[in-house]
Image (cartoon, rainbow, N blue to C red):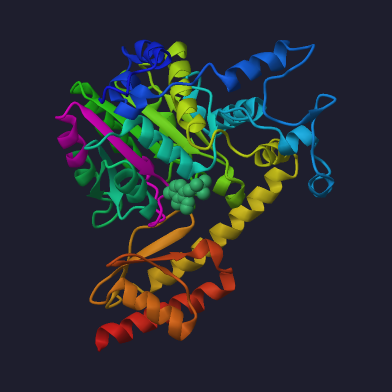
Amino acid sequence: MAEHQRISPLADELNAILAPSIAGRLLSDLGTRLYFPKGIIAQSAEAKKLGKTANATIGMAVKGGVPCVLTSLKEQVPNLTAPEIVAYAPTAGNDDLRALWLEAIREKNPTLGSTEISLPVLVPGLTAGISYLSDLFLGTDSVLLTGAPAWDNYVLVVEARRNAILRSFPMFAESGFNLAAFREAVMTEAHTGKVRMLLNFPQNPSGYTPTRAETATIVSVIKEAAETGADVMVWCDDAYFGLDYEDDIDPESLFSRLAGLHERVLAVKIDGPTKEDYVWGLRTGFITFGSKGMNAAQYEALIKKLMGAIRSSVSCAATPSQSLMLKAFKDPRNAAEKLALRKMLEERYRVVRRFIDAHEGHPALRALPFNSGYFMSMKCVGVAAEDLRVKLLHEHGIGTVAIDATHLRVAFSSVDAEKLEPVFETIFKVAAEMVAR
Ligand SMILES: Cc1ncc(COP(=O)(O)O)c(C=O)c1O
């Protein structure tokens, strides 16, 4: 560490609290340096409670105790007050929203029971959450394991941004999750004493979630690695949580199986309303920590580190998104509407499932296992995924994504059910013609 990078006494305080825990042992250099200043934000939060005569702390224009807001803005969101629109949000997010999300996590994951987990911290979208975790826990040469093919943003964050290593294991065996490759990757990493992995179910781009039996084995491999004395950190990217379309899938997050598993396992849940509540552009996500080896003071210290990452990058997430979500979550119409949207997605999945099952043995396209989420992907054999993508787009007006040289992803989530069969018929026909040439 360079001379000018002296550790702040505030970082030292947090490091001392975290030192005996798995989180302390896994922090990156940047994570070790981060702290949440007792500066403007902390002092103004204190003044908000106690500054009854005058609160001269925060950089906002306030009149009669209320932040000033332009009529042009206020008129567009009549149900929100001025503070709910324009006031700065707390660094870790709106307290009520955080409490509500914690309650929702517990409701959706009953296996958690009374397992102690941290309060969720609000971040501006799941991507930001992954990036902050990379700040805190990945240094140059740290390895983060993930299944391949993976969402392309992972490598951008982990390798381009953090200069760490995203190491892939092949996600699929002949059928289903490649448990042998997963075990091999985890146990190899366990020899270094530190295992970090990012698991995303339902997965982007394959649309796969492990079955209950596969999940049980994944959990046992993680435990086995921890029992060798390695610290094992598992980032659960739950972006597509809840969109499981087959009975043999565990409807709970892997996080709920890991949060209380072992002193040497630290699970992190990265989730949010982005896809779960159909609010892609609102940019709200959450980070929640769970480890049998951590206590409340250590969770609090880790949250302060995360707040340091937020404060030093975007400062805080947008207020209107948080205010809108807080109000929307309390609306009794949500449950029925969300169920209807889920059914709509499931119906699209069924159309694709039927088509794929009826067209096995295609000369160029092999569907990867899929059972959940927004997508399905196909392995292209004898034809380049990019060539197929370009032909489909330019000659047939069908947009797909070439994930890499050999995989084509189709987001059935964004195509009306009645269009899906003709779309897949065209994809299969074009690919067959290309490979026959
Ligand atoms: C696997 C996965 N994680 C995270 C995200 C990003 O979520 P957000 O839009 O909240 O950043 C996506 C979005 O495409 C995704 O596919």
Q: Position of residue 316 (x, y in %)?
A: 57, 34
14 versus 200 height, above or below:
above
Residue 117 visible in this rendered orientation of the protein: no
In which quarter of the view is residue 67 placed?
top right
Instruction: State the residue at coordinates (50%, 61%).
Output: 349
Does the magenta run of residues contain 420?
Answer: no
Check the image and name the residue furthest to the front: 4
Nearest the camera: 399 or 341? 399
Does the magenta run of residues contain 188?
Answer: yes
Instruction: State the residue at coordinates (41%, 31%).
Output: 268
Quadrant of the frame with the C terminus: bottom left
**Region of the chain picked out in magenta, as a range:** 184-212
Instruction: State the residue at coordinates (71%, 17%).
Output: 48
- In the image, taking residue 328 as reference, residue 179 lies left or right, namely left
Residue 33 visible in this rendered orientation of the protein: yes
Q: Position of residue 147 (x, y in %)?
A: 29, 48
Nearest the camera: 170 or 394? 394
Q: Position of residue 352 (x, y in %)?
A: 47, 67
